[in-house]
Amino acid sequence: MTSKAFQDYYTDEFASCFGCGRLNKHSLQIKSYWDGEESVCHFQPKHYHTGGFPGYVYGGLIASLIDCHAAGTASAIKYRDRKKDTDNNAPLRFVTASLHVDYLAPTPIDSTLELRGKVKEIKGRKVIVGITLSAKGKVCAKGELVAVQMPEDFS
């Protein structure tokens, strides 16, 4: 894995995201990295990330983690495919066009969550990313994100 997260390359104007914004003190502060051809993110839920049942993670948080990790993966793959020097250029930014999440099992709150992403399709400005979210070695949720590259003049 690389030492610098995808989100660390985001310029300050795009670093306020609730999921990964390094400049947002209320952000989840997720960090995504390459692990071979997959992207990976680890997240330790807090006690207040509970859902309707004590001891389990809130489903909306799971969707947010999948959304943000997949969008970061879309940016990173498009950037990598263009073979830009990530130390000298801001990465391409993506927004969510569609998010689908399947909740497969209750997600225990007392363990580190692992998200793994695989790029399914790249077509023009669109990237489709599949994500699995696991806890204690068990896949608890799967998601698919359709991400669209923001225009260069978007702000």
Image: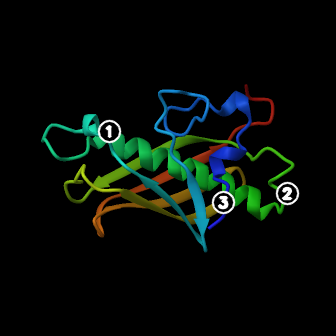
Among the two numbered marks 3 and 1 on one chain, the one whose residue lies closer to the N terminus: 3
Per the model, the C-alpha gap separating discs 3 and 1 is 29 Å
Q: Which of 68 and 123 is in front in this view?
A: 68
Dot 1 surroundings within 10 Å: few (below 14), some, or many (20 or more)? few
Dot 3 surroundings within 10 Å: few (below 14), some, or many (20 or more)? few
Write down the quadrant of residue 134 in the picture.
bottom left
Residue at 58% from the left image edge and 35% from the top image edge: 21
Q: Nearer the viewer, mark 3 or mark 2?
A: 3
Residue 104: x and y, percent?
Answer: 24, 59
Q: Nearer the viewer, mark 3 or mark 1?
A: 3
Q: Which amino acid does label 1 sit on?
A: Gly
Q: What element carries label 1?
A: helix
Q: What residue type is labelled 2?
A: Asp
Q: Determine which residue is flagged by label 1.
A: 60
Residue at 68% from the left image edge and 60% from the top image edge: 77
Q: Is mark 2 on a helix, strand or loop?
A: loop
Q: Determine which residue is flagged by label 2.
A: 85
Q: What element carries label 3?
A: loop
**Which quadrant does the N terminus fall into?**
bottom right
**Residue 123 makes an appearance in the image:** no
Residue 71: x and y, percent?
Answer: 57, 48
